[in-house]
Amino acid sequence: MGGSHSGKVSEFCLEGRFIDFVIKDGYQLKGLLLSSSEGECYIKLAKHLRAAFDLRLLPGTWLQVVGYKKYDIKKDKVTFKAERVMAARPEIGTLKTIAAPEEPPSIDQVKLKPAKTKATILVCQKSDCMKRGGKAVCQALEAALSDRGLEDQVTIKGTGCMKNCKAGPNLVMPDKTRYSHIQAPQVPALINKHFSDKGLEAQPDTFSEIRIVNPKFC
């Protein structure tokens, strides 16, 4: 990665291993953390890239990120903004595009289609939700998934505040349906409802449901 000129925007191409996504307000994807030879760095994703990702990209995946960097003279800081992200396999020198602007694909840039990915349940880990039973909800989720043989297909991920503290515990299911006031005894019925296509018999709902207005990342 070449050096940037003070006060000017320049292109960059960075390779490294994916660490995690950066999520704001509990569910909005903003960027990603990458571990490269130069250390760990935050890379903001351009708006047209955010919908191309989901939370199931595995940590440790080798990525190549192409975009623009800007040097802030006052803060003496370089910020990165990705315009294209590709999965790299350095051992054989090939690249596959994970996210890029809509355009005809070239020979070495093909939309990545994971063979097997996990669904993700987001659970607020802030203190208010934990005090209202969040820890028990997490334990109940783990037990319910294990009982149904779904632990290899569904992962539970803790998040920051979802901005609905008094209605906690709060969680978001893989289809972006958001639930509040969830308690441990209600978890089995919740899992049955959202994973009934896997041979489970749905149970009557005993919990409140709030549908997120925009299910896709913005």
Image (cartoon, grey):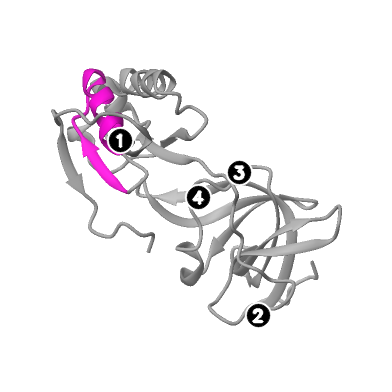
What amino acid type should be assigned to the residue bearing mark 4?
Answer: Val
Expressed as whole percent of the image width and height from the top left, the position of residue 18 reads 65, 49
Which one is closest to the eye, mark 2 or mark 3? 3
* CA distance separating discs 3 and 4: 14 Å
Disc 2/disc 4 C-alpha distance (Å): 26 Å
- Residue 68 left/right relative to 101: right
CA distance for labels 1 and 2: 53 Å
- Tell me the residue that label 2 is attached to: 8
Residue assigned mark 4: 22
Question: Which image quarter: residue 97?
Answer: bottom right
Instruction: State the extent of the magenta-drawn residues as a range.
Output: 176-194
Mark 3 Cα shell of 10 Å, populated few (<14), some (14-19), many (≥20) = few
Q: What crowding class fits label 4: few (fewer than 14 Cα within 10 Å), some (14-19), or many (20 or more)? A: some
Query: Which residue is denoted by mark 1 in the rendering?
Result: 196
Q: Could you say whether the residue bearing mark 1 is in a helix, strand or loop? A: helix
Mark 4 to mark 1 CA distance (whole Å): 31 Å
